[in-house]
Image (spheres, grey):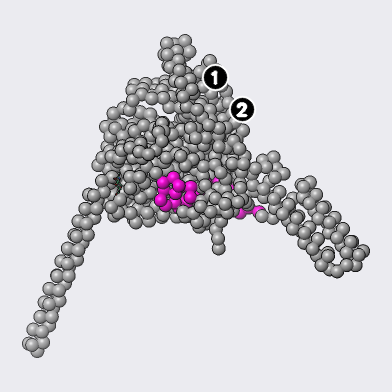
Amino acid sequence: MRAALWAALVVVGVIAVICEWLQQQYQQQEQDQHQHNEKLHHQQRFPNIVVMLVDDLGIGDLGCYGNTTINTPNIDRLAQDGVRLTHHLAAASLCTPSRAALLTARYPNRYGLVGEEGTVEVILNIASKVSLPLEEVTIAKALSAANYTTAAIGKWHLGQMCGAFGRGCLGPKRHGFQYFYGLPLTLISEAAGSHPFWIFPLDDPFYQGLTGGCLASVLVILVGWWRCKCRCLVTVIPLVVVVLVAAVLWFLLTHYRLHNQEWWSVSPWLMQHLNCLVMQDEVVVEQPLVLEGLSQRLVDQSLEFITNHANDSRPFFLYHSFAHVHTPMFTLPSMAGHSRHGRYGDNVEEMDAGVGKILDALTRHNLDNNTIVYFVSDHGAHLEAIAPDGQRTGGYNGRFKGGKFMGGAEGGIRVPGIYRWSGHLPAGVTVDHPTSLLDMMPTLLHLAGLPPLHQLLPNLPYRELDGVSVANLLKNGTLPPPRVLLHHCVQTIHALRLVQDKKVYKMHIAGHKWPEGSTQCGWGEESYCQCYGDTVQHYGHQLLLFDLQKDPYEDHPIPTNTTEYIEVTGMLQRYLANWRSRVPYPRSQFRSVANTILSPWLQPFRWP
Ligand SMILES: *[C@@H]1O[C@H](CO)[C@@H](O)[C@H](O)[C@H]1NC(C)=O
Ligand SMILES: *[C@@H]1O[C@H](CO)[C@@H](O)[C@H](O)[C@H]1NC(C)=O
């Protein structure tokens, strides 16, 4: 009995010793791993960069920009921990050109990625030739040259550059992104719901003609067969030919709209199947894309990217471009009906939840002090947007006048913008000095401690950048040198902004003739203010000048007989004349319908 007790004690003792030893080993291993990670982080001389770009989000749509009834806790938290920009300006009031400017630090007018009078204004088809030219250098190209791992996740909308049979659709990858997952184009209203394939309206003369032609041909063939009493085959072949010809005619004219006034457009069914895709690099992974859960799928991709590269020795650059809050409005059922602002508010909240997940992932991987985060919207909210059921589906630009599509109007270009780099940039600070989306590349390179573009890529032919580094402004409020910002409505300059140390003036050369008491052009998902034609007014010699510090909402033009007016407008006009003589704008890439139209031979497909 005593012996058994002793034996048991010895066994327990041995087990305890082994456990202790194992635990020590494990702790040691953990410590080693930790030290290893620390070393990696130490070696990682340059910080990671995460850019989060939202589509069509207005400056009045966020809690941290003064909205008291919308719920955006994650973006508000980002602002609390970073630098919030209150005078942050998009270079264009439309997706394609604004994104091009963001990524290249150059006005899209320099390379024709803007519309012209009478053309479309954004890329409308994946299978089309318009794109960000390869000679342009994006921040992803610059960061790739600095050994960053780069990824674009979400909406691209700068041309997928597909080759014949839809091969080699490497748009983002040709611009320095090593990985792409997302929408080659953008969300479009056709992405929602299902659209009929069988369209045969018999009240339309074309379809009447097609039916009549078919019936007549069949009749002729049958009568001929009966009269000549030939073999069956002789009838079958013409019948098959007639049916085929009719089917092809029907398809072309129904889905390609060739008989329509807008003959370059295609049917909603074709739009949904050919332009609502999700691609992973050059492979189509969803066709047509599924709206429900899209936001989460995109965020999950970014989380995976962060997790995969959190411990790399090379830094990473993640460009997460939300599909939200563009129309159509959709959320997970669990996120629907929460906001006081209807489906639009629900979309803002779903987007905010995505921001939260990305920020949490950075914190979880201990990357906050080692990652610069930049949050921004591509341009102002689409004021006219309204769903068929009457619900507003556009955002709010605060008290700034106008919105999306209106290049010179403040509401179209004044957007939310937040930079955060914990431990390196001040927290909870507001910068009221004007900054631009054009400044992203020079600023991020500067903040990260990298050389400017031309040193990073010494073989690059010289190009003038329109953006400047505002790194010191963010760090300690040092103002950048005075400058002039141009505000284009597609190809034409509608306004100029003089940014000096103490004063900010905006001069309007042209503007929109809004109906009394409104700053928008009608209502409807497809309604917007054109940059040309009847809705635009050129001020000629009656240029409008505003002092934006005294009058941020542009209610009181400076009287034309003051010295202030004469001096500032004179200076800006000289600047403009000099700019025009110095910087030629090429013709718009959208000018030729052959470039913008859906070209089926360039269409990428999901192969079964
Ligand atoms: C990138 O890596 C190459 C090769 O290791 C090195 O020569 C170069 O200096 C690195 N670039 C930067 C900006 O660190
Ligand atoms: C908050 O945002 C919603 C949605 O755009 C807008 O309708 C509302 O007017 C905003 N409210 C305030 C107080 O800014």
Residue 533, labelled with which disc? Answer: 2
**Which residue, as the protein is rendered here, is positioned at the far right?**
227
Residue 402 seen by the camera: no
Pick whichever, 45 or 501, lies toward us.
45
Residue positioned 55% across, 60% down in the render: 607
- Quick one: label 1 or label 2, which is nearer the N terminus? 2
Residue 587 seen by the camera: yes
Give x and y (percent) for residue 538. Answer: 56, 21
**Which residue, as the protein is rendered here, is positioned at the far front?**
459
Residue positioned 61% across, 46% down in the render: 598
Residue 539, labelled with which disc? Answer: 1
Task: Give, as a single range, the part of the protein colored magenta.
Answer: 170-196
- Cα distance between the residues tagged 1 and 2: 14 Å
Residue 208 appears left or right of 547: right
Q: Amino acid at mark 2?
A: Gly
Q: Quadrant of the N terminus?
A: bottom left
**Which residue, as the protein is rendered here, is positioned at the far bottom?**
1
Give x and y (percent) for residue 293. Answer: 48, 55
